[in-house]
Amino acid sequence: MGCNLAIAGVTGAVGQEFLKILEERDFPFDSLKMLASIRSAGKKIEFKNKTYIVEELTKDSFAGIDIALFSAGASRSKEFAPLAVDAGAVVVDNSSAYRMEPEVPLVIPEINPQAIAGNKGIIANPNCSTIIGIVPVWPLHKANPVKRMVVSTYQAASGAGHSAMVELEEQTREILAGKEPTCEAFPYQIAFNAFSHNSALGPNGYNQEEVKMVNETRKIFDCPEVAVTCTCIRIAVFRAHCESINLEFTDPITPDQVRDLLSTAPGVSVLDDREHNRFPMPIDASGKDDIFVGRIRQDESIPENRGINIWVAGDQLRKGAALNAVQIAEKLL
């Protein structure tokens, strides 16, 4: 069964990834409307042997649309998603606009697909760092509840959009040529550098990215009591985020038990080769659907073998954004 599909923000990095994934997964649609800002209206995009003309996103864009995939930013989602719902569409929104609204499901299909049924027209796609971090934590949490989670992220430029990826490449060329790097997409030099995530700081010193990870994990797990703390950092990588995750469990758990649980977990690949010191890297995850997990080891600072450390890598544009949204749309069909 096909549907009438719209993509809002089709010319952005995530919008372009939507198209790749829809084609790879042979997503069934009867019609496809490509939407973007007025700057991109009129552009031609080739997709599945057909030429589409990008249309301006307006209040009248959603007549007859069944599913709308949004990746046009929070302000546009707030403006246009309710209009899409009024026109009869179900919106899968990739922005932060609706994630923490109590009546809006926040969904990772490997974790809480049952939440999709409760939608009132809008389903929120979680933050990329949240998705990449908790897809592998969930099967462990189901087996042995996680009491506390300490996360340090190493986040790729792609999380700040296509312009940030271009800036990383251009800055690298500039620096190698002995020139001053041009900083526009990011406040600081990203090439050959790392800096604290460039989202706004709250009065408690945590940035928005860190707060999102805390609140979204609790909502998706339906576990408000789980303790989560994060430090989010940008690094000079194009499109795959890495995360160091320390977990404190309710009961004892061994690294072998963790490997066994993750070996059959959906959306997870274990890459944990101690003999060759070979563990997940951004180049392993880039362009891949799964979250890669390694460095699985006991945290010897936590008593009774209740602590585990893991290291994960996941493609920010795929599972961290577009793939997760398309998986939600597949469930809607």
Image (tube, grey):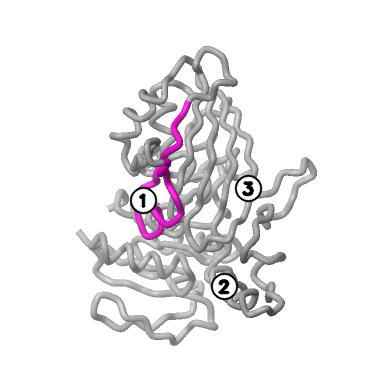
Label annotation for residue 128: none
Name the residue nearer the viewer: 145 or 184: 184
Secondary structure under tag 3 reads strand
Residue for point 41% across, 25% down: 255
Say which label, 3 or 1, has the lower sequence index.
3
Residue 198 position in % (x across, y down): 68, 57
Magenta stretch encompasses residue 281: yes
Instruction: Provide the residue span drawn in magenta.
Output: 277-297
Is label 3 or label 1 in front?
3
Amino acid under label 1? Ile
Residue under the point 58% across and 38% down = 151
* Extreme residue in the top direction: 304
**Is 268 contained in the magenta span?**
no
Q: Is residue 129 above or below residue 90?
A: above
> Which tag, 3 or 2, sits closer to the chain's start?
2
Q: Which residue is mark 2?
A: 163
N-terminal of the pair, mark 1 or mark 2, is 2
Circle 1 — which element? Answer: helix
x, y (%) of residue 83? Answer: 49, 64
Identify which amino acid the numbered label 3 is placed on. Answer: Cys
Mark 3 touches mark 2? (CB < 8 Å):
no
